[in-house]
């Protein structure tokens, strides 16, 4: 099949690789209808993570079941499914605790930017729609495989409450989905930190009530101005850098929590300040499957529409351009059609 | 009046100092019935915090109102009161959010090991009993001014749930109160990490179902054995050292939180591991007043009895011996009678 592979920093190719094959009865193969590039794919693309040359890349996809293993009973060829980027059996103690990201049988989508992809724990991981969704729904459904679920995890981890004030640090696709999550959860005020006009526009569409363009200390000061000197009831840290985390911790009001979902790069946590201000921190890799049934309902009911985070759609054979567009911030997030 | 003063590391004296005087209408003066030594008093005692020679020390006390300022309407001379170590107006945005430890008018008890002490925000801070309590209740009431409320804050911050498993790191008085809090909140299993027989006994009295004597990696392994490899649903970190925090974060199950109340000394938080395991952290200085009315009811109803953390009672003029006994771990916590 054709699949995206990475060979070195900024060396992304569409290659011919062997088709995925089922070698365990819990697996399924999905023919990809839509995949996309994740902000976290840019870490190896930029040479900031280790790379094994020739590895496939891409972990977000929706598609149609092609084949299932013998133990997969709830899904059959032809079903349209959303694939959580982290696969989970949905039965182990961690899954029963709602923390599918720590499943005893954790697996990952390894070829989301490809024609086919393998799901390790299909029965526990996948959710399906009734029949084929309208093509216009595909972006919103695709967003559930990672970016929307991750934004939701930031909001859950940050403890967003109805009627409260939420600050979202980061205007990437995850941050924008964090705005949508906080807004849907009933935060009365959602402050998005963003200095890019097109992203500000999406943030407003997603429910941001205020935009703060400043960063660092100036950004924090602006947020204290907006909150009568109090700070935010909940903060979503959706970047993963030290500056973003410091800002997030600074603008959280005493007693509030920062929910963090940006893979940490170079972060040093100021434990003494956290203690002195009673500001907590929680988060990590999103337990996508825990949220997926609810989020799927919300998307199908039209209660949330995260689709607009995809502001560019390209055919799979232009995957190299997809990475470039995101790297150069010409696109928020690129949807790929095999 | 006679008050405890600190002059250098291990130089604790009972000195004659000026009586406290009311200089703001929100203040009150309390004649101390009982005070005590806090684990955090040992940091300056051991020379690990800066000292201003001659400063009074001690921040935990109960007593009888001697005099009130013009704006103090709910308390009158003769009332028996519990004094939260941190004073709060109970009306500012932080207090209304339940985070009295960040009150806009925050103050502290500065002479708890003395004959009299000044309360800055008396109206918002104090709670009183109906009449003079039975002398046998004094230790339990005194515990509410800090140690029990701080253990409670660890349990709240760690997210202790009914039916869950809680691990308490630290067998000082705060850790023991954390055991009592977790047990009272309905944790089915409360694992106390302690290697000192007398403290283990108090822990069991307070509701510990298991004791782990090992520390560090061995202690963590033992906890995984006790929890079928899963880890704890909630962890209370009641020490403040790097080793204690590392253990606490390690034994928390994915999706759980560590509640920390030990003033951090030399802690480096492993942000990457926290992210990878979805283990959160929250806590800080306890918002005592937020918990005080409820905890007072629990003590008066006999639902909790934190009094046994005081395993030594001395007259105030033996305060030097009180510090030595705690420093040498001959006593868990020493109650002082002026």
Image (cartoon, coloured by chain):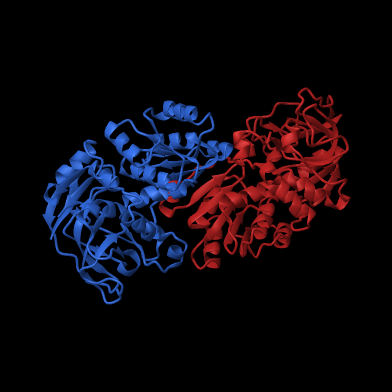
Chain colours: A red, B blue
In depth, the one of B281 and B189 nearer the eye is: B189
Q: Position of residue A84 (x, y in %)?
A: 72, 40
Give the left or right position of residue B100, taking residue A195 as reference: left
- Whether residue A131 is visible to the viewer of this picture, yes or no, is yes
Q: Is residue A204 left or right of residue A248?
A: right
Q: Is residue B109 above or below residue B77?
A: above
Q: Provide residue A36's location: percent of width, then percent of height.
A: 78, 42
In depth, the one of A17 and A281 nearer the eye is A281
Residue at the extreme bottom: B70
Q: Residue at x 26, y 63 (%)?
A: B81
x and y, in percent, of residue B23 in the image: 24, 72
The answer to whether A102 is drawn above or below residue B317 in the figure is: above
| Numbered label tally | 0
State the residue at coordinates (32%, 69%).
Answer: B123
Residue occupying the point 43% across, 25% down: B218
Reply above or below: A278 against A223: above
Quarter-wise, where is residue B176 in the image?
A: top left
Relative depth, front residue between B200 and B94: B200
On the image, the x and y values in percent for residue B104 come to 40, 65
Give the quarter of the image for residue B170: top left
Image quarter where the N terminus of chain A lies is: top right
Residue B57 in view of the camera: no
Of all residues shown, which one is farthest toward the top? Answer: A23
Most foreground residue, B261 or A330: B261
Q: Quadrant of the C terminus of chain A?
A: top right
């Amino acid at each position: 099949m054709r699949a995206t592979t990475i060979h070195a920093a900024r060396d992304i190719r569409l290659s011919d690789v062997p088709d995925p094959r089922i070698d365990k009865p819990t697996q399924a193969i999905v023919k990809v209808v839509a995949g996309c590039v994740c902000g976290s794919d840019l870490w190896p693309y930029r040479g900031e993570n280790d790379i094994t040359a020739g590895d496939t890349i891409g972990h977000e996809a929706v598609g149609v079941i092609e084949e299932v293993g013998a133990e997969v009973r709830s899904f059959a060829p032809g079903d349209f499914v959303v694939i959580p980027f982290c696969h989970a059996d949905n039965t182990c103690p961690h899954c029963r605790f709602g923390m599918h990201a720590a499943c005893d049988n954790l697996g990952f989508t390894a070829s989301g930017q490809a024609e086919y992809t393998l799901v390790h724990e299909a029965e526990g991981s996948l959710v399906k729609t009734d029949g084929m969704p309208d093509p216009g729904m595909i972006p919103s459904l695709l967003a559930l495989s990672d970016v929307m679920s991750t934004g939701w995890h930031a909001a859950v981890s940050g403890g967003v409450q109805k009627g409260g004030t939420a600050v979202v640090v980061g205007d990437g696709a995850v941050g924008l989905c964090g705005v949508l999550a906080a807004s849907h959860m009933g935060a009365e005020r959602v402050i998005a930190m963003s200095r890019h006009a097109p992203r500000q526009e999406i943030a407003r569409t997603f429910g941001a009530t205020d935009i703060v363009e400043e960063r660092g200390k100036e950004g924090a000061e602006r947020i204290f101005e907006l909150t009568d000197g109090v700070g935010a009831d909940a903060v979503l840290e959706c970047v993963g850098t030290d500056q973003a985390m410091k800002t997030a911790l600074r603008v959280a009001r005493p007693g509030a929590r920062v929910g963090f979902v940006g893979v940490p790069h170079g972060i040093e946590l100021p434990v003494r300040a956290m203690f002195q201000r009673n500001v907590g921190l929680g988060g990590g890799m999103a337990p996508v499957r825990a949220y997926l049934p609810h989020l799927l309902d919300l998307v199908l009911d039209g209660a949330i529409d995260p689709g607009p985070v995809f502001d560019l759609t390209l055919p799979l054979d232009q995957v190299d351009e997809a990475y470039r567009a995101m790297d150069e911030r010409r696109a928020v997030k690129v949807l790929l059609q095999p």
